[in-house]
Each structure stands twice: as structure tokens, then as C-alpha cells.
Image (cartoon, coloured by chain):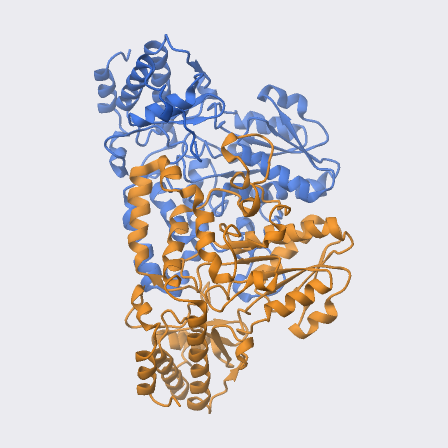
Chain colours: A blue, B orange
Amino acid sequence: MTSSRNDCLALDAADALAPLRAQFDLPKDVIYLDGNSLGARPIASAKRAQEVITGEWGVGLIRSWNEADWFALPRTLGDNLAPIIGAGKGEVVVTDTTSSNLFKVMAAALDAQRERSPKRKVVISERSNFPTDLYIVQGLTRLLDDGYSLRLIDSPDELQSALGDDVAVVLLTHVNYRTGAMYDMKARTAEIHASGALAVWDLCHSAGAVPVDLNGADADYAVGCTYKYLNGGPGSPAFVWVNKKHQDTFWQPLSGWWGHRTPFAMTPEYTPDDGIGRYLCGTQPIVSLSLVQCGLDIFAQTSMDALRRKSLALTDLFIKLVEERCAEFPLTLVTPRDHASRGSQVSFEHPEGFAVIQALIARGVIGDYREPRIMRFGMTPLYTSFADVWDSVEILRDVLSTGSWDKPEFHRRGTVT
Amino acid sequence: MTSSRNDCLALDAADALAPLRAQFDLPKDVIYLDGNSLGARPIASAKRAQEVITGEWGVGLIRSWNEADWFALPRTLGDNLAPIIGAGKGEVVVTDTTSSNLFKVMAAALDAQRERSPKRKVVISERSNFPTDLYIVQGLTRLLDDGYSLRLIDSPDELQSALGDDVAVVLLTHVNYRTGAMYDMKARTAEIHASGALAVWDLCHSAGAVPVDLNGADADYAVGCTYKYLNGGPGSPAFVWVNKKHQDTFWQPLSGWWGHRTPFAMTPEYTPDDGIGRYLCGTQPIVSLSLVQCGLDIFAQTSMDALRRKSLALTDLFIKLVEERCAEFPLTLVTPRDHASRGSQVSFEHPEGFAVIQALIARGVIGDYREPRIMRFGMTPLYTSFADVWDSVEILRDVLSTGSWDKPEFHRRGTVT
């Protein structure tokens, strides 16, 4: 039973992860429930940025490509990130954006199928997938101009019947950005493989949020970002993983010089590097890339199992408190109650969700809004406390009961909602 | 006549651009002649990074996408960069890497030709082009798998005869990375257009180095980096330009959500933004991206014409002093003597160029080496002084005359040469 703020404070006092919060810079007047969109700032990032900027760039200048190992950074960070997603050394690189990595991966998967099963020309994904995933497939299939198409399913239940001998690749996002619903990666991958298709997983809302076991699931390819639960910084470079069994055979078209076997030989013919290196393309933004390590350093102090236990406790508590204490308001839980199907966020629909979120932000509770009508609250066990959950629900109750959300300024849309 | 160090000091004293050097952090023990590979650090970058990291990210958190205009940054920086390359407002975005931007641009150009002249399936470029340009075309043509091919010319003289009614696009790098030779962009573009092909220009060694007039030349597409002469920081995001006449018609396959007309409507169908915005793809590395402005702020204090005058004076002086004072050593000038054909670097061949460059670096003169046998010396008039030129040639003379380059440690190759 958690029915008072004191109960929440007791949970925080007993929480072995609670001390990790001190490694983040969180404004005192804010309850931050948007780590699912942009992770909070590791305090170490400011010092690290100064080292990279004034030391490695300013003093080291061009020499830092060797001496500060800038060129190795995508691989070093990939190795450090790997355990969080159930991957091994040499299987991950941190580079580019999720969207461009997805382009590489989808092209690689279609290329593999073109050799194996040339009649398979359909990509399956979900209509409710994060739009950029669909846009990238649309761009790629239009470019290929050879009968490739995107088939959208409206719910996970439709996957089985959508699979057929024309399907080349299934692209699924492990945890849905809107609802927080999570796929059983292992079961779905097996189902996809049984039909003869390849499985591509988008881990943007999973990496650092829930335990992921890419090798255990025998997935084929995966991409994800580092700026949400991994706290790499705004727009920090994304990651891309490929199963060892494809590593030396896959091909991808963004074949820039960083993916070449001997980039500094400067030969006119492209020869791909062995393994994961061939996913690299162009010169990476070293300052932003360097800060990814500061987030990973905090993960190295705990485990995804411990984080998962706290995450489920936080989301359970948030759901319970909202349903008990805001029962008279038109809130509908969108996120699955079943633990096995839930990521690390809680989403509620409200007819005026946009304005309610703006009113909450004005009161210091930062969640966010996604069309249509969905209010998202991300629980990030590295820095979200049980008291944060209590306080945010109390402020939500106050905003709803006073109707303070119904002001013109809370209905006004910015560029980025 | 410049025949003494005092003459060089007099040139510096009379140089109206000399005070700009104080805006860069240059180590006291270094003569930096490698701004053509990685630009020096604007002093303002450290403070700006702290503002972005501790203020915009740490305190602003997710709100900074709107409040700090992060989402607009690729366009804002593009507008600020535009005058340096003869482009207008709304014609440039700063985003992604040169390699991935080149993929977008080449796909866009081939797509345009597919509609206009479907039989044109050849891309012309130079064998001596920077390799990533060739690798990207190889990746794209393999992906298209529809008869597209890359035709390499061995020298600019071969361009005219290589042009024919099968040529879709010509991809040239304005200033060659090895030799420093510069094309006449306007004349070559006219020649390319006359044959029915489209002209794509890589400005990596031009932007901020020499006056560029993309609109004056009526070029079609252009890409370039910001981390060389523009001093944006290691691996800072690249830029992409498209001629106004193509802006609302071009299509490119890396169609991520940042290029969507209404990215936050989260609709499953991709609808490209008007104009240059459709070159955007995924979420950008905001810290690295923000630092690009620090470099542009210094360019705003002068003009490309003034920089060009000093650049030619520096490269003229460097050539003259090397040829006079190192006449007895096997150095061969690779860079054109003709001003109209010269970028902002001087390259000399030496049979042991690699070791000589390492020995120079050990003495504090930072140039770099490119296969085969080429020693590159970049002159960056924002911070290179005439005394730097004198001193570097004296140290080169000493290294060559004492044979101090011939030590085992100077023959050892690192990852990045």
C-alpha cells in the first residue's frame, strides 16, 4: 500500500538506486518525466565537454584523431553500450542518426533477401510505429523502384496473418513511443524467422529503459538512439547493431570512407571493413559523440535488471495513484497493465491532453504530448524517485480539478509540441 | 621581396586580418598548417558549449527544442553560412555528414534525370576525388541496380570528352584535397549543363577557403563540411545546398522525420517540407551543431575577398620560400602556380613525405600527409601569419638538411595518418 507521500519517501529511502540521481543535473523546480524524449544531463558531461573542446580539439588539434582515439570512438562506445542491449563486443557502433542507420539496416536486410529470396519484396511495419521508421522505408522503396512496398499492420495481432512468402523484412519498434506497449522480442523474432523474413528492431524507447537481449532473441538488425534513456545529450549519435551471423556478409549503401577497410589508403574503390565497421559512413560529430560515454558510465554502476524492477514499481505506482486520485477525470490508461508488455513510460489519453500537459509543464511537471490526445510520462529509474511520482500525480489532480489547464496559453502550439 | 623574417613580421603588422587570430586558441608551441583538415578552435566555443550543455540541456531539458530553437538550428546555421558560398537564405541546411549529404544529393540528381532523360545513367567524377565521394556513388549505383555506373576521369582535361548523352550527373570537388588545384566552377558548370548533365560540387576544401559563388555559377547541388576552414569543431555537421530552381521539386531517399512538412503531426505518410528542409533526415547532434556558429561568427567580421587576398599572399610566399630556401632537396610543387587554379593549401611531393611530415610535427609544424608522397600545408588566413610561413619553411629546411626525418619513429604509421 502506497497511499501517502511518506510511503513514497520510505520507498526512496529503501531504494538502492536512489544515490545515482546525484550524478544528474536536475533543476530543483522540476519533476522530469520526459527522459523518454530527452534524457537528463549527467553532471560529468560539462567537464568532459571542456576536456574535448579545450584539450583534445584546442591543444591536440588534428593529432587527436590518433592520440585521443577519436577515430575509434564509434566502436569504443558501441562496445560499452553493447551489454545494455544484449549484444557482444564488436557488434555495435555509435554513429549518425537513428533515421540514417535505419536506412542502412533496411537496405542491408533487403539486399540480403534479394540474394536469398528475390521474390520477397514487402516490408511489414506498424501504422503506429514512430513515423520516421515508416518514412525511411518509403524513401528506400521509392528509390529502389523495383516492386518493393511497405505493408502496415494496425495492431500486433495482425502480424501473423500479414506474414507470407512475399515478406522480406519486418521492422518493429520494441516499445511503442505513444503507448509504451512492448513486444516480446524473442517470440516475435521467431515468428518472423519461421515465415522466412528478417527481423529489424528499433530500440529507441528500449535501450536503457528495459532489458533487451538481441542475441538471445536472435534478432537480425537493430538501431536505436542514445539521447533518451541513455542520457547521451540532445541529438547525440545513434547506434546500430547487426547479428554476428550477418556481420561479414551484409552490405549497405551509405558506404562512406569511415566504413572502408583502409580509409587512409585513399583508394578509389570501396572495400568494406570487416564486421560492424562497415556500418560507418562519414566523419562523426566528436563533441556530441564523446558525451555519450558520460551516460554509459552511470549504467555501468548498476544493471538493467535492477533498473527494470524499479521502473515497474514506478510505473505501477503512477498508474495506481492516477486511477485512485484522479478517478473523476476523463483519463484513459493507454499503456498495458501487464508487466511483460510495458516499457518504462505511462501514457494516458485525455480529451484535452495537449493543454493539460502544457499546464503541468507550467507547474514544473515535465511530461509530453503526442497526437492524438496522449499524455506521456516517462519513468527513468536512474533519476526518477517515488516522491516524484506522488508529487506529479498530486499536481495533475490539482490541474484537472481546478481546470487550470483551460487557459489560452496552454492551447497554443509551438513548433515542437 | 620577402627575404627575411623581419619582412614577414612587417607583412603581419600591415595585415588588417591579423587581429582575428586572437579569436582562436592556438597552442604557443605550434605552427598550425592543417586547418584544411581540422580547423583551429574559436575561443568562444568553450563558453558556448557550456551554455548549451548546462543551460539549454541541463536546465531547459526537453523545453529547449522550442525555447532554444534547437529544431531550427540546421536552417539558422545554413542561412548564416550561405553568404560564404554564394548562396541565399533558405538554400542551405547544416546537417549530417558530407558523405550522407552526398548520398542524398546524388540520389536527388539521378532522380531528377530519371524523369527528364531516363537514358542518362552515368555519373562522372575524378579518380583523384576524395575517396568518400566515389564510395558513396558506388554505394548508390549498386543499390539502384538499374544500369547506373560511375565513370572516372584521370584529369580535368578529360571532362569535355567524357561528357555525352549518357551522362546524368557530374560530381566534382571544387578544390582537390591532395593537390589544392581548383576548378573554374562557373565554366565547368556551363560545360556540364551544355551536355545535358547536372553539376554537383563538393566544397569541403572550398567553403571558407576561397570565394565560392554557387548561384553565380548556376550549380545544381552542393555539399561540404564545416570542420575544416569553417572551424566548426571536430566532425561538426556538414552542409547541403540546392539551387532554388530545384528546391520544391527535388526528392531524396533519406526521408526522415526532420524533412517532413509537419514532423510533429506524426502521420504515417511522408510529405516533404517545402524547399531545402526536405534535405533534413534525423535528429541532429545539438552540442556539436551549436559550435558551428562560433566559427561563422568570425567569418562575419571579414569577407571572402579579403581572406582570398591574404590566402594567395600566404601560399605565394610559402611556395617562393620553399623553392628558394629548400632548393637542394627533392621537393616537387604539386599545387598550381596560377592563382585562378589554386585553393588555400600548398602541396609538395617528397619521396619520404610521410616521415618528413612526422618530423615536422615533432618540431611543432603541423601539416599532414596524403598518399602518395604528398605533404600538405594549409594556409588559413583567419589565423595563419606570414611569420608562420617563414618559420615553418625554416624548420622544414632544418629537418631536410639535417636528415632528422630519417628516424624509425617517423616512419611508423598510426591509424590516422
Q: Is residue B318 in view from this perspective?
A: yes
Relative to A113, is A224 on the left or the right?
left
Is residue A320 depicted above or below B273 in this figure? above
Looking at the image, residue A219 sits to the left or right of residue A16; the answer is right
Q: Residue at x 33, y 87 (%)?
A: B7
Q: Is residue B289 left or right of residue A117?
A: left
Farthest top residue in view: A328
Return the residue nearer the eye: B360 or B15: B15
Residue B166 placed where, x, y %? 77, 60
Quarter that holds the N terminus of chain A = top left
* Res B126 visible: no
Residue A342 vs A89, above or below: the answer is above
- Above-or-below relation of B49 to A216: below
| Residue A143 place in picture, x, y as percent | 67, 44
Q: Foreground: B201 or B82? A: B82
Please state which of residues A232 and B353 is positioned toward the viewer in this rendering. Answer: A232
Position above or below: A315 against A60: above
Quarter placement of the C terminus of chain A: top left
Q: Residue at x 22, y 24 (%)?
A: A13
Give the number of callouts.
0
Residue A309: x %, y % from top left:
36, 24
Say whether residue A371 is left or right of residue B359: right
x and y percent of residue A88 in the render?
Answer: 47, 42
**Is residue A304 or residue B156 the one in the foreground?**
B156
